[in-house]
Amino acid sequence: MPVTLPDDLVQPDGGRIVLLVMDGLGGLPPVGSDGRTELESAKTPNLDRIAKRAALGLHVPVMHGVAPGSGPGHLALFGYDPIRYNIGRGVLSALGVGFELARGDIAVRLNFATIDGDGIVIDRRAGRPPDEENRRLVARLREGVTAPADVQVFFESEKEHRAVLVLRGKGLNADVTDTDPQETGVPPARAVALDAASQRTAEVLDAVLGSAFRVLAGEERANAILARGIDAYHDYPTFRERFRLNALAIARYPMYRGVARLVGMETHPVQESDAASVAALADAFAEYDFHFIHFKAMDSRGEDGDFEAKVEAIEAVDALIPDIADLEPDVLIVTGDHSTPATLRSHSWHPVPIMIASNWCRPDAKAKFGESACRQGELGIFPAMSIMSLALAHAGRLAKFGA
Amino acid sequence: MPVTLPDDLVQPDGGRIVLLVMDGLGGLPPVGSDGRTELESAKTPNLDRIAKRAALGLHVPVMHGVAPGSGPGHLALFGYDPIRYNIGRGVLSALGVGFELARGDIAVRLNFATIDGDGIVIDRRAGRPPDEENRRLVARLREGVTAPADVQVFFESEKEHRAVLVLRGKGLNADVTDTDPQETGVPPARAVALDAASQRTAEVLDAVLGSAFRVLAGEERANAILARGIDAYHDYPTFRERFRLNALAIARYPMYRGVARLVGMETHPVQESDAASVAALADAFAEYDFHFIHFKAMDSRGEDGDFEAKVEAIEAVDALIPDIADLEPDVLIVTGDHSTPATLRSHSWHPVPIMIASNWCRPDAKAKFGESACRQGELGIFPAMSIMSLALAHAGRLAKFGA
């Protein structure tokens, strides 16, 4: 009998799960030292208290050696194969700015760029315009760009030189090449369909971009746009369908709310502060089976290359832990979506510390939450895709497999 | 060149392997404590002596978070993918009662049930009849039920309300829905074929069940039967074909002999006691390359929720170890098919302690056989499917892969 695990084992009832994501949590000791990582350097009495009653381990978000973006990192945490469900950059950007994508929409990441009188790209980022200038340019595009009558066109600001284009219409397919040539000194490329089903999309995109070039012709710097990451918004099986979970995402940044919406979670509008996120969790706690709560600062400070600031960001989350632990979730998972070592100033491939606290662990009284302790933990080093199986198991939500 | 590992590397000769399975071996400390598991609480001087010359680790039977039944748990130990070779409940029940299934047989798990005058199910277990009553009912079915002329029908007693039906005939396929509605207050469902190839099976099953209802019509409580877990007995590649091993299973319970037969092992009829099992192993030792010996009590006491009794069951197996070690198998593997923590009173998903003793280990003189030591062991936390590869390697039965 064919079977899909863990989905086919999921029960309708069980314990309440909190998945707490400290973005970019994993780290490295300073280069050349045998010292401690950011997490191991931080004073985290509250996380350490939970570690002593938790199962510890390290998860590999995609595969050994692969540094994931935020999209794949979170999809893996949510139990979705990040390779099979590879999200195009256009879709991620649209989700990131909070655009409500509908199934079948074609999303395209845009750069404002500068071309010279011969149509040659001389700056792929149009001098990185400030966000206010970006919004003025997008307003002009919204007003002036024309498209075929049966296609709706949406432009959205992102940041600096970045914007998003969404095409909505019947019979659009996304196998279309980028117009961004990825270098200066050449003209923008034409959008080329890679299959017959995408022919119409390439034509529409060329028409829309042509119209946009005419609208922007008088601009001093942002007189062109380059398109890339063209992708369709696909039909994902939802969290409710797969895991029978009524799930809420509490994330201050639209990108993470977007990925959560991809898998059918509801999203909370809170944005003010991490403390407000925790208050939102407490308010909504009883109404959902599953809460995803996201804290961003570790990743940002890691990308800044600021070891000490990342340590402080971790300590700031630690201070919020008691208010979460007081809610007494049946299963509390603390982890990151990937590592962002300050020494590397970027997302990295290093396995990510994780702990799963429930009544059904083999605890280690000496454990502290950190990479070294997690390496010795009962979960071992395992694929992030298994986290949801473990969460469901610890919550008593999985039936036995086979007799 | 396509290659299947480890199968394509297997050599015709090598050392003798004993796979000793302590059913439900893995455990948890009492809830809320950071203390010892059942195995760590047991006094096991003989197992500990072997641990000091063994490779230790933890195996994951199916996948993280998934608690396996005995079928998948043992298939994984035997090196068979438990998801690919998913066994339907009907087949497992037939194997469990010792029925000699032939390839192509359709096996069905039956419940005796009670229906009212309108044919509505009012008790899905017919008041859990005693085993003697079950055997009387099965005798009536064997005598009275009629079937199409080209189909052989077998009924077998299991326990309480459980029985097994086997259909043997040409052109039967098993994609047929259950007639057990899984709830009371509704009539039994009809058997529905999910594909054209199973149409005939659905018709035969409906005819046999109709005949059974007429036979049981006068019974006070067990006046109906409900069918589920309908599955065909498939053709498994055998242990001899895959591993060139002449294998014997010594297991007191028919379920485990059944799973061993699935993969082509011979089975020993011993049933009296665990000591008799060890004597049988000693007697047959020289005649087989591979011995699977199974001890059940750990699992039963875990399912009872009796921590101390599980500890004693483990100690009782420990007392038998010297007689097994004295046989000097080239490879001795001690493990469980899954965890059954007394605190959970059920099979669980927790990784299972394993040790592999041979001359080719990296031993740890301080090691004792238990979850904590295994977590630190040289095997790490690894899929149960790899155990047979390791067994063959330690027995000198695997050639080098590639030049």
Image (spheres, coloured by chain):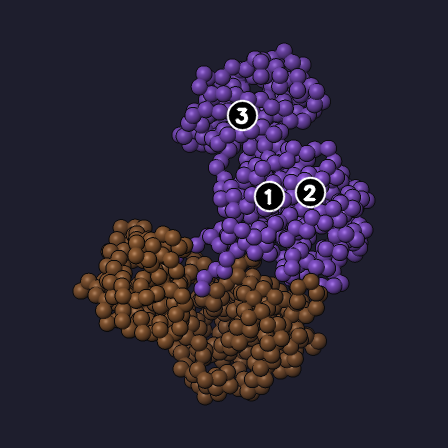
Chain colours: A purple, B brown
Could one spot residue B49 in this view of the protein? Answer: no
Dot placed on the residue nearer the N-terminal end, 2 or 1: 2
Residue type of the residue flagged with mark 2 = Ala
Helix, strand or loop status at disc 1: loop
Residue B35 picture location, percent across and down = 70, 68
C-alpha separation, residue under disc 2 versus residue under disc 3:
36 Å
Please tell me which residue is depicted at 81% across the width and 51% down the height of the picture.
A43
Q: Which residue is mark 2?
A: A282
Question: Can you say whether B175 is above or below A347 in the image?
Answer: below
Residue B274 picture location, percent across and down = 50, 83
Dot placed on the residue nearer the N-terminal end, 1 or 3: 3
Task: Provide the chain ID for the residue under circle 2.
Answer: A
Q: Which residue is mark 1?
A: A288
Please identify the quadrant where the N terminus of chain B is shown.
bottom left
**Contact between labelled residues 3 and 1, with CB atoms less than 8 Å apart:** no
Residue type of the residue flagged with mark 3 = Val
In the image, A28 versus A188, the foreground residue is A28
Q: Which mark is residue A166?
A: 3
Horizontal side, residue A303 vs residue B325: left or right:
right
Residue B67 picture location, percent across and down = 53, 61
Residue type of the residue flagged with mark 1 = Tyr
